[in-house]
Image: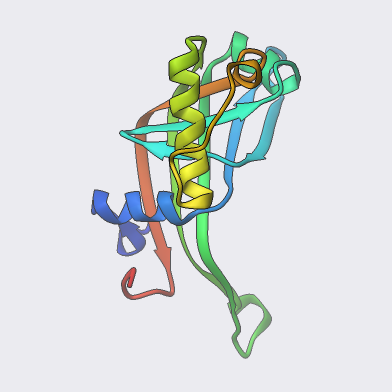
Amino acid sequence: MRRTDKEITDRATIDRILHEAEVLRVAMVDADRRPYLIPVNFGYHQNSLFIHSAPEGTKLDILRVSPEVCFEVDIRAEVHQAEQACNWSMKYFSVIGFGTVSFLGDIADKRQAVQTIMKKYSGRDDWPIQDAVLIPLSVWKIEIRSLTGKRSKYESFD
């Protein structure tokens, strides 16, 4: 990271940002080297991100061929005003990472991943999820390879 004064190196803080974030942006590159970016709901557990989606679509076509991704989350974003136009900026915390996507096929693995996602947004991890819902669902896991945290205009996370 160029601005080491903004870097967050504490893994606990990075984990807290990932848990607090509501939207994960996943970037990938298709076979023709065109970038493709999607916002998704997600769950985070044990160095992995979990996403579910329809069983077909552009993102899945790309990921089946090129499973390497970059992802980003940000929280507490605010416009930081200044007297001069080019001195305006943003106040935020963010995490950018790289990882590899794999698709979960086992019903028990899918159920656990969906429970992880549901717990993130609802606080509950005991949702009854029928096999008939899970079987056609595409559930994917991003195994995180690296993470970088950044803060701008905040002194600390708390």
The x, y position of residue 98, in whole percent, is 44, 32
Side of 82 where 55 appears, left or right = right
Q: Residue at x 45, y 52 (%)?
A: 123
Side of 151 where 35 appears, left or right = right
Up the image or down, 143 lies above or below 79; here it is above
Q: Residue at x 67, y 35 (%)?
A: 37
The x, y position of residue 99, in whole percent, is 43, 27
Residue 9 visible, this orientation: no
Side of 29 where 125 appears, left or right = left
Q: How many marks?
A: 0
- For this rendering, which residue is in front, 152 or 134? 134
Q: Quadrant of residue 112?
A: top left
Residue 70 visible, this orientation: yes
Q: Residue at x 36, y 40 (%)?
A: 147
Q: Quadrant of residue 41?
A: top right
Up the image or down, 83 lies above or below 80; here it is below
The x, y position of residue 44, in whole percent, is 42, 39
Q: Quadrant of residue 129?
A: top right
- For this rendering, which residue is in front, 47 or 80? 47
Split into 4 quadrants, where in the image is the C terminus? bottom left
How are the colours assigned in the image?
rainbow
- The residue most toward the right is 57
The x, y position of residue 128, in whole percent, is 53, 32
Q: Residue at x 68, y 29 (%)?
A: 35
